[in-house]
Image (spheres, rainbow, N blue to C red):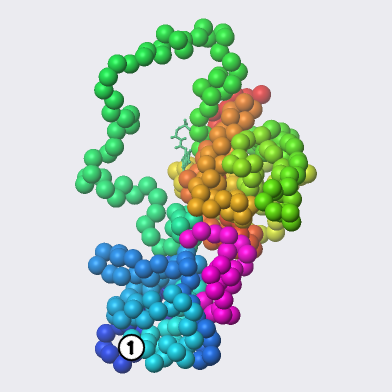
């Protein structure tokens, strides 16, 4: 049973006196185990602002990006009772209500962070009392998007599954033409090949490399040059916010690629499998000091990271270096409301293209990877998933097709 539970293969049914289930708990993360911490009648509970109720097929489910499990609601009176928790309520006050979910289920929802135990607080202060500062800075839709569009915190089908092939026609590669007169650019853009700029040539040559030459690994010198050109801090400055007299001073550290609001929230973590002059392992690239900082990890977790990259690229072996682009989310959400996560993803596009171009310029190979496991990264680094987490990956090395030196 424990082994099945460890893999998230068990569901847990909660019912009280009636024969039918009140709710069914569906684990979303490996290792989830339902826990029911003791709840005192004096405790004050409120629904988390990250919790949401929705239809899935013909079921009603309650979930949260913070929860290791989702709740299938079978008895709709439970939903009505939980709705009263949009304002903080004492457990003792809930007990008398119709459809009271029962102390055990309340405790389980507290353990999942769908319900929060709070000191009485109102309005904005309620948001701050929901957890740590990093959590307070997340907007609901951003955290739900982050947790559901990456691997590690949900059990939904994920990746290139072609779920609607045979049902909906594949959208065309090129947009159907707009009607009307056109302005032909071909006559204006043709350039004799000898006058093509070096950048235009690199853009033209750029391509994805998924298989790397195990006999000729990338060297530490090449890696240093690659990181220096594509990610090293270039310039630092501070400015005062003009909001109030005691507004804080904000520091900036610009890098070679553009970044929304000059936030430069992206960090590079390197999983090294095969690099001449550098021990295999996991490293943080300190872009300010231009140094690699080794991070102690378990071999099994590092192998999990490489195996997922190999699978995503359908490659014959792991990349020589796997770069994880991680975001310090608060750096962006401290300033931006509603658009923080989407800005971060746009920044990831900018850094990925920068790495592609630098790899091409150096005769190396690279490939963007569209999946991240946010739970595995949290295990590797010991950092909670909402504080700093992976938002992009890039495989780097010397491709099999690289011209020899
Ligand atoms: C955001 C993004 C995610 C990608 N994810 C993957 C991936 O998971 N696996 C893979 O093999 N290639 C991945 N690629 C590479 C694309 O497949 C590749 O860019 C595309 O086929 C065009 O080929 P080219 O890069 O050689 O020009 C990704 C590219 C981007 C930009």
Residue at (61% x, 55% y) in the render: 334
Residue at (78% x, 44% y) in the render: 289
- In reply to whether residue 320 is colored magenta, the answer given is no
Q: Position of residue 133 (x, y in %)?
A: 63, 64
Location of the N terminus by quadrant is bottom left
Q: Position of residue 355 (x, y in %)?
A: 60, 35
Taking 92 as reference, is 113 above or below it? above
Q: Position of residue 142 (x, y in %)?
A: 49, 56
Front position in the image: 71 or 178: 178
Residue at (59% x, 41% y) in the render: 260
Lateral position of residue 309 relative to residue 75, left or right: right
Taking 169 as reference, is 177 above or below it? above
Label 1 residue SS? loop
Taking 357 as reference, is 281 above or below it? below
Q: Which residues are magenta?
A: 116-140
Q: Quadrant of residue 135?
A: bottom right
Q: Position of residue 323 (x, y in %)?
A: 60, 45
Front position in the image: 259 or 393: 259
Provide the residue designation for mark 1.
98
Asked if one can make out residue 63 in the rendered structure from this viewpoint, the answer is: yes
Lateral position of residue 180 relative to residue 330, left or right: left
Q: Assess mark 1: CB under 8 A from ligand 1?
A: no
């Amino acid at each position: 049973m424990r082994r099945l539970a460890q893999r998230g293969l068990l569901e847990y049914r909660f019912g009280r006196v009636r024969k039918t289930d009140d709710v069914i708990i569906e684990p979303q993360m490996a290792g989830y185990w339902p826990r029911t911490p003791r709840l005192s009648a004096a405790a004050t509970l409120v629904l988390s602002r990250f919790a949401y109720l929705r239809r899935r097929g013909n079921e009603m489910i309650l979930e949260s990006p913070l929860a290791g499990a989702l709740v299938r609601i079978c008895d709709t009176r439970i939903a009505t009772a939980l709705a009263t928790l949009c304002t903080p309520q004492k457990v003792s006050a809930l007990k008398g209500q119709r459809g009271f979910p029962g102390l055990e289920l309340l405790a389980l929802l507290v353990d999942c962070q769908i319900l929060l135990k709070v000191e009485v607080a109102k309005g904005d202060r309620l948001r701050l009392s929901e957890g740590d500062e990093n959590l307070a800075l997340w907007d609901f839709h951003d955290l739900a998007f982050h947790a559901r569009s990456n691997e590690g915190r949900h059990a939904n089908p994920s990746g290139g599954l072609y779920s609607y092939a045979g049902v909906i026609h594949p959208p065309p590669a090129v947009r159907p033409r707009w009607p009307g007169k056109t302005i032909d650019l071909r006559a204006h853009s043709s350039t004799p090949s000898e006058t093509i700029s070096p950048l235009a040539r690199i853009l033209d040559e750029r391509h994805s490399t998924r298989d790397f030459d195990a006999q000729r690994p990338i060297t530490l010198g090449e890696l240093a040059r690659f990181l220096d050109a594509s990610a090293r801090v270039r310039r630092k400055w501070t400015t005062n916010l003009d909001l109030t007299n005691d507004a804080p001073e904000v520091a900036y550290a610009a890098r070679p690629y553009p970044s929304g609001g000059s936030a430069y929230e992206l960090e590079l973590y390197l999983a090294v499998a095969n690099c001449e002059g550098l021990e295999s392992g996991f490293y943080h690239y300190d872009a300010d000091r231009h140094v690699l900082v080794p991070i102690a990890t378990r071999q099994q977790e590092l192998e999990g990271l490489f195996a997922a990259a190999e699978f995503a690229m359908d490659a014959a072996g792991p990349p020589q270096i796997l770069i994880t682009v991680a975001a310090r989310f608060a750096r962006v959400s401290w300033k931006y409301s509603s658009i923080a996560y989407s800005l971060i993803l746009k920044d990831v596009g900018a850094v990925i293209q920068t790495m592609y171009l630098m790899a091409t310029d150096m005769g190396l190979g690279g490939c963007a990877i569209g999946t991240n496991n946010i739970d595995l990264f949290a295990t590797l680094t010991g950092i909670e998933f909402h504080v700093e987490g992976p938002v992009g990956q890039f495989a780097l090395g010397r491709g099999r097709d690289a011209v020899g030196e």
